[in-house]
Amino acid sequence: MKRIGITTFAAVLAAFLWTVPAQAQLSLGVAAGGTSSSMGGDLITTTDSDWGALMGGWSQYRLQSNLAFQLEANWAQKGGRGTLEGGQVDFDLDYVELPLTAQLVVGLSPTWDWNLYGGIALAFKAGCNVSNDAGDKADCDQAAPSWTFNSTEWSVPFGTSFSYRFTRSALTADFRYSYGLSNAIDNLRL
């Protein structure tokens, strides 16, 4: 089978951070934001972007003042829009995503940090719907029984973020691109 990848550009609009007092190097936080994804690969050239949501939590462990590792657990909506047999088709896929990133932390001032990061992410399919231009929506297994929707997806997330630190918390704006390494749908031809 030829490879179909889903790439996701996730712009996490806000993330809140609470420092755990017992260990100064460990931080915990919650995240919420939006995703814009499209599908592409060897069998299809590209699809239109599809907007979704992202919510989750994360923990960050700082090894040094400028080096940290971050593990996240996110619910992310991905998908794309394309033309199939002359009609418009929307793919809406929900994932539980577990990114692990290494982060370079640059202190810009006593209250501002800039992070540059990259890593690996494993995502587990939590839901899948296909809808047509008439608005009919169905589960992927019922709407397209001949398609193989994979239950896992691997990707490489990389990006940058800016954080403003308060006394015991921070507000972060994060801009991420995730390059899909595995197929979301094995045998789809758009």
Image: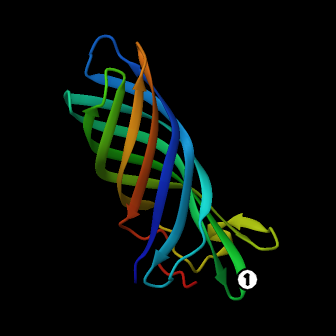
Q: In percent of the image, x 29 and y 11: which residue is there?
A: 22
Image quarter (top left, top right, bottom left or bottom right) of the N terminus: bottom left
Say which residue label 1 marks: 87
Label 1: few (<14), some (14–19) or many (≥20) C-alpha neighbours in 10 Å? few
Under tag 1, what secondary structure? Answer: strand
- Residue 185 in sight: no
Residue with the most extreme front position: 109
Q: Is residue 148 visible?
A: yes
Q: Position of residue 103 (x, y in %)?
A: 27, 41
Q: Is residue 35 above or below residue 130?
A: above
Q: Quadrant of residue 164?
A: top left
Q: Could you tell me which quadrant the C terminus lies in?
A: bottom right
Q: Residue at x 40, y 36 (%)?
A: 162
Amino acid on which disc 1 is placed: Gly
Query: Which residue is more in the foreground, 189 or 112?
Result: 112
Residue sitting nearer the eye, 43 or 171? 171
